[in-house]
Amino acid sequence: MDTRKWAIGALLLALAAPACAQGEPAKATENSVTVYGGYRFGGSFSDVTTGKSWNLTEGPSYAVAADFGIDRKTQWEIFLSHRSSALKPSGFAAPVDRFGLGITYFHVGGTYFFDEVGKGGYIVGGVGLTNFDPKESSLNSETRPSLNLGIGFMAPLGKSVAVKVEARGYATLVDSTGGFFCSGGCVVQIKGTTVTQGDVLAGITVRF
């Protein structure tokens, strides 16, 4: 037998043996899409004329996130969250002078898993824009820069499905001294510097 061919074959066998012993290697990256239902709370403005506080009502929200693998612990994320809220004057339990206000967050960021992507605890964050969309015809929509930070836990239900629970906080830079939403003839003029809100979310994740 040719000695050179024997040596090459032996070398290839030696290199292949550890891989065979360890089995199939773990996935280096993972992508996923998550659909959430949640509960949003917090946020207020001040009335330019009266100085009274206008509070955002709390209630159901929904969100969707697309996560794309970077390595075994990190992903970058596209995140959208919406709630059809309302502004009401402080101190009124009934919907006195209330008007509807849709609030949508559009963020790009990422997640970092403490163990590895797909299971256990993680931190999440992103930056982007907040869109405020009043339902009153006399008020204009506004878009402002914002960020979110949060913490979550992911529990796999198999190779392709998991559940997530998260708590996220949002901060939107309004920086308006008067006339926010307004371009003349407003029902109400409000002002503010930073609007903060929180979301508690639970979601179903499809992994691929």
Image (cartoon, helix red, strand yellow):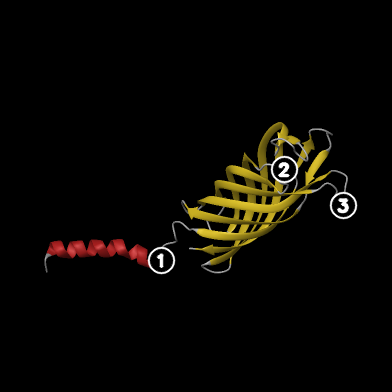
Callout 1 amino acid: Glu
Q: Which residue is found at the position 87% from the left and 51% from the top? A: 93
Q: Which residue is found at the position 17% from the left and 65% from the top? A: 6
Element type where label 3 sits in the image:
loop
In this picture, residue 33 sits left or right of residue 37: left
Question: Foreground: 193 or 89?
Answer: 89
In this picture, residue 172 sits left or right of residue 28: right
Question: Foreground: 206 or 117?
Answer: 206
Element type where label 2 sits in the image:
loop
Name above or below for residue 30 compared with residue 184: below
State the image coordinates of residue 56 (x, y, percent, origin top left). 76, 46
Q: Do the residues labelled 1 and 3 touch (CB within 8 Å)?
A: no
Q: In which quarter of the image is the N terminus?
A: bottom left
Q: Name the residue under label 3.
A: 94
State the image coordinates of residue 77 (x, y, percent, origin top left). 53, 51
* Marks 1/3: CA–CA distance: 61 Å
Q: Mark 1 points at which residue?
A: 24
Q: Which residue is found at the position 75% from the left and 38% from the top? A: 186
Element type where label 1 sits in the image:
loop
Name above or below for residue 13 compared with residue 29: below
* Marks 1/2: CA–CA distance: 62 Å
Callout 2 amino acid: Ser
Q: Do the residues labelled 2 and 3 touch (CB within 8 Å)?
A: no
Extreme front residue here? Answer: 185
State the image coordinates of residue 161 (x, y, percent, origin top left). 55, 67
Q: Name the residue under label 2.
A: 138
